[in-house]
Image (spheres, helix red, strand yellow):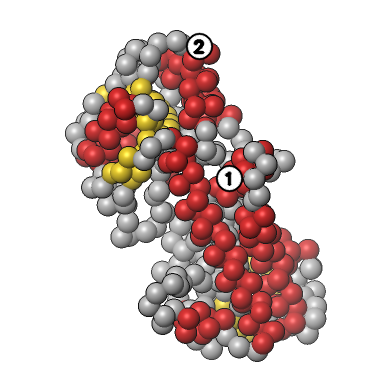
Amino acid sequence: MKIVIIGQGYVGSALAIAAIKAGHNVIGFDTNTKVISELKEKESNLKNYHPTNNEADLKDQDAYIIAVPTPLDENNQSDLSYLIQASKLIAKSATKGALVINESTSYPGTLREIVITEIEKINNSQFLYASAPERIDPANNKWNIKNTPRILAGIDEKSTTAALEFYKSICEEVTAVSTPEVAESAKLFENTFRQVNIALVNELAQISSKLGISANEVIAAAATKPFGFMKFNPGLGVGGHCIPIDPIYLAQKAEQLGAPAKFIRQANLVNQQMPIYVLQRLKELLDGDLKNKKICIVGISYKADVTDLRESPSLVLLKEIQNSRANVVFHDEIVKNFNDLKSAPLTPNGFDLTLVAIRHSNLAVDKVIASAPIVFDCTGSITGAHQL
Ligand SMILES: NC(=O)c1ccc[n+]([C@@H]2O[C@H](COP(=O)([O-])OP(=O)(O)OC[C@H]3O[C@@H](n4cnc5c(N)ncnc54)[C@H](O)[C@@H]3O)[C@@H](O)[C@H]2O)c1
């Protein structure tokens, strides 16, 4: 097939590679010229891949797949402006019979209410439409586009059949559900499930601390039960593009319809407050005051082995510690630079306290232990350190 993928970021570029491997011809379109020039250089050996920011290249292709950002705006409301722009572009480029797919995460109803509505304002040709939410997990070595089961749904049988045909060429397992709204809701519910369970163990960490026991030991003990329990680990909070944001999309839609979303809102609050809770714990360990204390935060991306800083709780903690007038630095050999700061070396006894927020696989744990008399570990993986 001749495919256009709109958005060549994390999701769109991975999809492009998967589609090329399956024998399709791919035009990867992105509005960011830097993204395109980097891809042109990096993927120059791929004959069937054409990264571009020229809208004229998108005319008359078989399928148009949207993979653009769906963030929150400054008022914490869903920001669908990128999706609207992408839809307008498809309306200007596609001809009758083209398959239009949305992979971007958004609330149930987005395909019909936003994508189709925007396209039909400009172009009244008959298109096939489907929703096929992406499930990719950055830095996961086991699960990728090919072996992660995909769910999708078209607006009618013909659309579903066309979408199934494409995804079966790149994924081992594809399931069609009855409507795009089911597919869109399933994606949001998967991430909400994680968000709520992470909030629950984060609350357990706070309860266990007051009880004077280890939350990690409690969770490991509960996880010996072979049924009715699934293990989640507490942490400094949640970050990235998915867990802090997707549940808000679901909550907003629910509230618009007059349905409750109290669990989702509460889980969000618990996770957002974790850096503040940890700040309090650090104060207790440093005699009540952080002023002039030398503190190092280890790991500032939102999860291990990625450079992505979006919504990272480490950055919230960093700011809080700065506001407490401590002398704070960070150590992260993957991110390396953040604003004017550079990753600081873990010198022996270089700090009053070292906090491990994220543990990248290249982290030298012995250096962490030697770097301060007090080590606070949010990852639950460093023996002998203070735990959440
Ligand atoms: N990253 C993940 O782990 C992940 C997992 C599952 C789903 N998703 C979802 O996939 C979508 C894309 O996420 P991402 O991580 O790839 O984002 P990203 O920020 O890495 O990439 C998005 C790209 O889209 C480009 N873009 C923005 N507006 C555009 C437009 N009008 N036309 C063309 N290009 C445009 C941007 O320049 C950027 O390069 C989001 O809805 C996200 O929630 C992401």
Q: Quadrant of the N terminus?
A: top left
The vertical placement of 162 against 231, above or below, is above
Compared with residue 69, is residue 173 higher up or lower down, i.e. above or below? Answer: below
Q: Is residue 263 above or below residue 151?
A: below
Mark 1 or 2 closer to N-term?
2
Residue at image point 46% right, 63% down: 304
Q: Report the amino acid beneath label 1.
A: Leu
**In the figure, residue 91 lies in which quadrant?**
top left
User: In the rendered image of this protein, does residue 220 appear above or below residue 62?
Assistant: below
Residue indicated by mark 1 = 250
Nearer to us in this view, 344 or 20: 20
The amino acid marked with disc number 2 is Ile
Residue 219 % position (x, y): 50, 79
Secondary element type, mark 2: helix
Q: Which residue is mark 2?
A: 122
The mark closer to the camera, 1 or 2, is 1
Q: Residue at position x 80%, y 81% from top?
A: 288
